[in-house]
Image: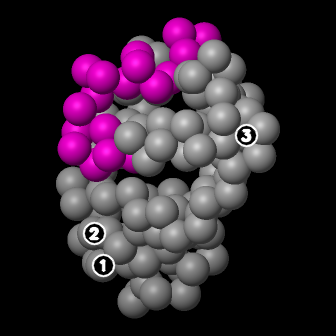
């Protein structure tokens, strides 16, 4: 798959997440997908996203930086959200927070097979009013 086609596929995947079309995840995510070393498959991946939406109803994935090389996608995603209750074990409790997530994806045959993700928790901690 060309890097140009992989970029389009990735942007379509982000649109799928933002549109909450989780029934279409199988088009983008492999049946044996792994997230941060945990085998989730497409069903577990969907459940993870649904939990995220439940905890963060205004979740919107914004691409801030995108690099594509061979069958890898590196993306810096930006979030400006209002999580309910605790988020990443932090008492956010409805406060508006902004943070980024650095995510690396490995694609195979046009589907996400592996994801490595790190959220900037320190940025969230700095914004909380205790």
Does dot 1 land on a helix, a strand or a loop? loop
Region rendered in magenta: 14-33
Whether the magenta-drawn stretch holds residue 15 is answered as yes
Q: Residues within 10 Å of mark 2 (few under 14, many from 20)?
A: some
Please tell me whether residue 63 is drawn above or below residue 49 in the rendered image. Answer: below
**Quarter holding the C terminus?**
bottom left
Q: Horizontal and vertical percent for residue 14? A: 40, 46
Residue receiving disc 3:
72
The residue beneath circle 1 is: 96
The earlier-in-sequence mark between 1 and 2 is: 2
The picture quadrant where one finds residue 47 is top left
Q: Nearer the viewer, mark 3 or mark 2?
A: 3
Cα distance between the residues tagged 1 and 2:
4 Å
Q: Is residue 25 above or below residue 97?
A: above
Mark 1 vs 2: CB contact within 8 A: yes
Q: In which image quadrant can residue 97 be found?
A: bottom left
Mark earlier in primary sequence (3, 1): 3
Q: Position of residue 12 (x, y in %)?
A: 38, 41
User: Label 3's element?
Assistant: strand
Give the labeled residue for mark 2. 82
Tell me if mark 1 has few (under 14), some (14-19) or many (20+) residues whose alpha carbon lies within 10 angstroms of its own.
Answer: some
């Amino acid at each position: 798959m060309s890097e140009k086609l992989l970029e389009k596929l990735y942007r379509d995947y982000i649109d799928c997440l933002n549109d909450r079309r989780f029934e279409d995840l199988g088009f983008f995510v492999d049946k044996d997908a792994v997230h941060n070393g945990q085998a989730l498959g497409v069903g577990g991946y969907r459940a993870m996203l649904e939990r995220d939406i439940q905890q963060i109803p205004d979740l919107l994935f914004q691409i801030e930086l995108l690099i594509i090389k061979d069958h890898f996608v590196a993306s810096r995603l930006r979030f400006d959200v209002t999580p309910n209750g605790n988020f990443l074990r932090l008492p956010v409790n409805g406060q508006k927070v902004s943070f980024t997530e650095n995510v690396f994806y490995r694609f195979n045959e046009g589907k996400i097979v592996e994801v490595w993700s790190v959220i900037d928790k320190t940025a969230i901690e700095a914004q909380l009013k205790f």
